[in-house]
Image (cartoon, helix red, strand yellow):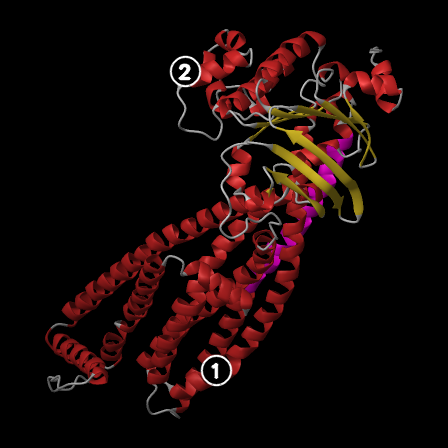
Amino acid sequence: MKSLIAFYKYTFSYKVQAILTIIYNLLYVIFNLLSLVLFIPFLQLIFKVNETADLEKPHYTSGFIHFFTYCKDWYNYTMNEMVKNDPKYALLFVCVSVIIAFFLKNLFRYGAVWHQSQLRMAVVRDLRDQLFAKAMKLPLSFYTEQRKGDLMARINSDVREIELAVIAILELIFREPFAIIISVASLVYISPKLTLISFVLLPISAFVISRIGKSLKRTAKAGQEQTSLVFSILEESIGGIKIIKAFNAIPFVVKRFRKVNLRLQQLNTGTFRRSDLSPLLNEFLGATVMICLVWFGGTMILDKSDSILGGAEFITFIIVFSQLLRPIQGIATAVGNLNKAEPSLDRINEILDTDESIYEVENPKELSGLNEDIRLESVSFRYKDEWVLKNINFDLKRGKTIALVGESGSGKSTIADLLPRFYDVNEGAISIDGINIREYKLEDLHKNIGIVSQESILFNDTVRNNIAFGREDVSLEMIIQAAKIAHAHNFIEQLENGYDTMIGERGNKLSGGQKQRLSIARAVLKDPSILILDEATSALDTESERIVQSALDDLMKDRTSLIIAHRMSTIINADEILVLSKGQIIERGKHRDLIAMGGIYANLCALQGIFS
């Protein structure tokens, strides 16, 4: 029931398109039935062509119900007069009337399709917008626990299932029930006895279809989960193609993908088989019911046990009953689509309902720049149940530089991630100018912090757009100036299209040093008051490191900097060096002081050939 309400809300998020679709569908149903019912008077006259009687010309008085009676009597009167005068002309009149009815039926059906296509695509667009926006807001911890391919599958295949459900809900609630009501009303009008017999037989069909629907829901859920696994393997394999080739792992990776893809094929095959079985069974059972009605109705006519039912009425009853099967089959199909979409809705809601963890306080304070210092007081942080940082205390003054060193997993990058609130501390507090960073606007906090990481995160766009990333208010002159400070201008000018050169996915058309200099140019253009350098030169060769380090030195001038260092030569001049081990600060001081102590820092420097 909750799923039905959710689908209903999605459908009526665009009320105009939904209402117009309903109206056009109702008109389609009316003219679809009318195109068949128009034959009744003519069939009656054909069967009784020699028994035409004088009918009085009907007169409309008043009332809604009387209007339909008047229309029927007027049509019978007109047909009776035409048959008496010229039966062929009456046949022509019926044919033209039916053609007009068919034209209007299809015209209204296309009108419904016209508006429902806009409705379904708009809902899909909105859902993808919501999922993408949510994905951008989710904390980094979400991506350490979830596969990116799974998220891609939810945005792609799960949303497609919702698209089908949006249309199914309109047909299930509005079109098909209306079609059934007017068809049943017509059947009751023609022969109440035969209609009662059909009502005894039809529930058998409904029971069988409901059993298939429950099975379909289970299979569809397993299929969507397997689709997520396929997307995840695709994303990982394409991203790691260099390692796959280097380790001759192509057969292994292909075998793994084929196994997962085979399982997906088996699940999807089962889903489609069950989905397609429902309308086929419904059609067969409906046909069986219709044959039973033919037998019962034929017996009534032959035995003359029903004074109302004649040959013309019986033929019309069978034609209208055959049309009753279509909306019943439509309901079965719509229910099948809703059952398939329900697991997808659950998976989408899992993302939309995920706690973002990082929230702003009411009426947050503005941060226009660092005036005094950044202070970490008794900061502790854990991933799930494992403590990564324990009681971290230090004070980074404005314009000064602090470097963090230590073995992998000691907590250096975690400190860097806590400062821009990619995570929130579990204990203690981080403050800027004496105010807890939780009280600042997130937008202002990120605006004042520039990050240059070990891995250059670039996008498949032009050099110009990568440097100006996230900003639309910068001129080419400002971009060039930033590139010059980052020592990137010269190599950019030598590219095929200069600043308009496409750099490929993740900047793979550039060397490591060139990519890093673009990252630095991006940070320069942002002009942050606080700078975080996360092992920014550790992945570079000696020559590239020299150029990039020179660019970093220019970037760090007059800025407050937090450096995570791998190469000790890059932090010799830091105002303070903090040595971390297992989430705790075990040594701190200037380079020369730490060397003199002869502790862990001195050993790290010695390993890199630095002794003083």
Q: Nearer the viewer, residue 25 or 584?
A: 584
Q: Position of residue 342 (x, y in %)?
A: 57, 60
> In the figure, is residue 184 to the left or right of 386?
left
Identify residue for label 2. Answer: 477
Q: Residue at x 53, y 47 (%)?
A: 131
> In the figure, is residue 448 to the left or right of 385?
left
Three-letter code, disc 1: Phe
Region in magenta: 252-278
Residue 99: tell me if it is visible. Answer: yes
Three-letter code, disc 2: Glu
> In the figure, is residue 249 to the left or right of 124?
right
> In the figure, is residue 274 to the left or right of 106?
right
CB-based contact (under 8 Å), mark 1 and mark 2: no
Q: Position of residue 148 (x, y in %)?
A: 64, 40
Compared to residue 35, the image places residue 412 above or below, namely above
Location of residue 542 by image quarter: top right
For the stretch drawn in magenta, the main secondary structure is helix
Q: Nearer the viewer, mark 1 or mark 2?
A: 2
Compared to residue 295, the image places residue 164 above or below, namely above
Per the rendering, the mark at residue 126 is: none
Asked if residue 19 is among those painted magenta in the image, a careful observer would answer no
Q: Residue at x 52, y 33 (%)?
A: 447
Compared to residue 551, the image places residue 371 above or below, namely below
Q: Residue at x 61, y 53 (%)?
A: 354
- Earlier in the chain: of badge 1 and badge 2, it is 1
Identify residue for label 1. Answer: 199
Distance of label 1 from label 2 (alpha carbons): 79 Å
Q: Nearer the viewer, residue 610 or 133?
A: 610
Q: Residue at x 46, y 20 (%)?
A: 464
Location of residue 258 by image quarter: top right
